[in-house]
């Protein structure tokens, strides 16, 4: 069954998309935890980091380059930002389609709760 994020990629569910290319999509998180909170996802449905293979290395690198581009686009280059990937139950993952959170626009606490 298609995940929520596959439905966003297919435009079956609306999202506030801020960047798109042939391999990646970036949209605003529906429940933002910072002034900027977007999700960077591959269009190919990889369930999470535990499911990645050596062949995915180029795609994963591409997602980080996209994160840098979107951070610039969102005006976060000077103040900085955080990238986070939650994986599995203990990691707090709720959608089984790999996604990188990009958070910024305020000072973020560490460690996470
Ligand atoms: P995670 O908990 O790491 O799996 O992150 C999933 C994220 O998806 C959460 O931050 C949710 O707020 C976000 N989310 C859930 N549904 C939507 C949606 N329809 N549009 C945008 N973001 C969503």
Image (cartoon, rainbow, N blue to C red):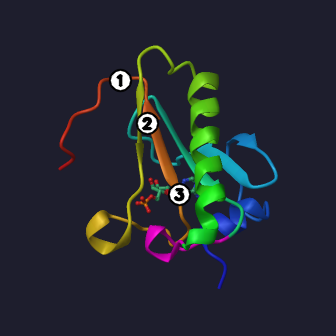
Residues at marks 2 and 1, CA–CA distance in whole angstroms:
9 Å
For label 3, count other residues whose C-alpha is less than 10 Å away and answer few (under 14), some (14-19) or many (20+): many
The verdict on residue 83 being magenta is no
For the record, the magenta segment spans: 45-52
Contact, mark 3 vs mark 1 (Cβ under 8 Å): no
* The residue carrying mark 2 has its beta carbon less than 8 Å from ligand 1: no
Residues at marks 2 and 3, CA–CA distance in whole angstroms:
13 Å
Residue 48 in the image, given as x and y percentages of width and height:
49, 70
Q: Nearer the viewer, residue 95 or 30?
A: 95
Could you tell whether 7 is left or right of 39 in the image? Answer: right
Q: Main secondary structure of the magenta part?
A: loop
For label 1, count other residues whose C-alpha is less than 10 Å away and answer few (under 14), some (14-19) or many (20+): some
Secondary structure beneath dot 1 equals loop
Could you tell whether 21 is left or right of 36 in the image? Answer: right
- Residue 87 appears in which quarter of the rendering? bottom left
Secondary structure beneath dot 2 equals strand
Instruction: Identify the residue at image location x=41%, y=16%.
Output: 79
Which residue in the structure is indicated by mark 2?
Answer: 103
Residue 37 in the image, given as x and y percentages of width and height:
48, 38
Which residue in the structure is indicated by mark 1?
Answer: 106
For label 2, count other residues whose C-alpha is less than 10 Å away and answer few (under 14), some (14-19) or many (20+): many
* The residue carrying mark 3 has its beta carbon less than 8 Å from ligand 1: yes
Residue 50 in the image, given as x and y percentages of width and height:
43, 74
The verdict on residue 48 being magenta is yes
Which residue in the structure is indicated by mark 3?
Answer: 99
Screen quadrant of the N terminus: bottom right
Instruction: Identify the residue at image location x=75%, y=55%.
Output: 23
Q: Nearer the viewer, residue 4 or 112?
A: 112
């Amino acid at each position: 069954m298609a995940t929520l994020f596959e439905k966003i990629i297919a435009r079956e569910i609306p999202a506030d998309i801020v960047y798109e290319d042939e391999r990646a999509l970036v949209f605003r998180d529906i429940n933002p935890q910072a002034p900027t909170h977007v999700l960077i996802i591959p269009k190919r449905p990889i369930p999470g980091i535990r499911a990645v293979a050596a062949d995915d290395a180029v795609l994963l690198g591409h997602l980080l380059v996209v994160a840098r581009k979107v951070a610039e686009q969102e005006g976060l280059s000077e103040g900085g930002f955080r990238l986070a990937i939650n994986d599995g139950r203990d990691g707090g993952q709720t959608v089984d389609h790999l996604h990188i959170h990009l958070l910024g626009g305020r000072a973020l606490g560490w460690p996470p709760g």
